[in-house]
Amino acid sequence: MDEDIYANTGNVLERKSTALNDSKEEIYMNQDVPETRTTRSHKETITTGMGSTGSRRYRLAAVLLGLLCVLLLTVIILLWFKFTVEIDQLQTSNSNLTAERDQLQASNFNLTAERDQLQTSYTNLTSARDKSQKVLSELMRFGRLKYFKSSIYYVSTGKMSWSESRTDCRERGADLLIINSREEQEFFKKELGSTEAWIGLTDRQTEGVWKWVDDSPLTIKFWWTEEPNDYEGNEDCAITNFQKAKSNLSVWADYPCQHPVVRICERAKAE
């Protein structure tokens, strides 16, 4: 009996102990749940906080990168603008240099043309001077040189016909005298004295129509009275300082062209 009681008591105590242990395990298990939830919540909070900080950093980096791109783009635009301005300036300078080069080339061309013209003029003057000196030398060999206004005159000492006299004058770069004024007529009166001389006046082409050797018509006349008379129809050339006039004035008369007298050659200084 006592053994059964003890046995039952033991079983009761064992069941109570087992129940108590189960209760403790359940309590411990229930206590572990909040701890686990708390830990997860904390971890989630930490994880969430770390994600927000990373996003802010990424956004800041993106903003900085955008600002850097804007800055680079601005620098590129400024450099391009400066480059464009410098290119325009270089093109303008090149245009100015090209214009100056063209002006210099034109000036050089003009100077070259002027130089050539001066050289040609100098050559012509030299040639004219040499020719004049040659003519003067030739004139001085065969007679006297006289100067009146713009012309040079040669008064020969030898006598020839009118045609021979003109040929001689032309060979010396001159021609028979053309008288254009009373002053010129009286000048040769003094030079010739009592000598008659051929002048460049004739009507050989048309009788009665007197012309000078340059084909100019006769406008001023110094004929002696009753001259020209074409005596015996054979007087077609004119002389000056006609001695039969017995006058203090120098006058003209018509003579046979074959008659030998001295000659007056005239050469203009301008030639």
Image (cartoon, rainbow, N blue to C red):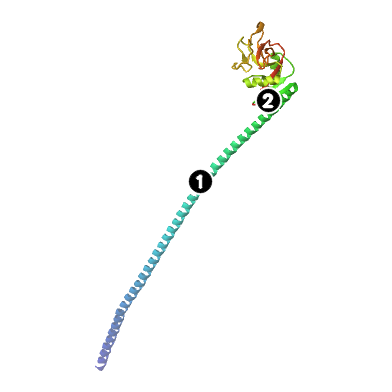
Residue 265: mark in rendering? none
Residue designated by label 2 = 147
Furthest residue to the bottom? 2
Evaluate whether residue 121 shows in this view.
yes
Residue at image position (36%, 68%) is: 52
Q: Quadrant of the C terminus?
A: top right
Label 1 environment density (alpha carbons within 10 Å; few <14, some 14–19, many ≥20) = few
* Mark 2: amino acid: Tyr
Residue 127 placement: quadrant:
top right
Q: Is 158 displayed left or right of 111 in the figure?
A: right
Residue designated by label 1 = 92
51 shown above or below 206: below
Furthest residue to the top? 232
Residue at image position (62%, 32%) is: 117
In 3D space, how far apart are the residues under numbered discs 2 and 1 (Cα atoms)?
Answer: 66 Å
27 shown above or below 271: below
Name the spot of residue 73 as percent of width and height, x first: 44, 56
Label 2 environment density (alpha carbons within 10 Å; few <14, some 14–19, many ≥20) = few
Report helix, strand or loop for mark 1. Answer: helix
User: 174 or 48, which is in the foreground?
Assistant: 174
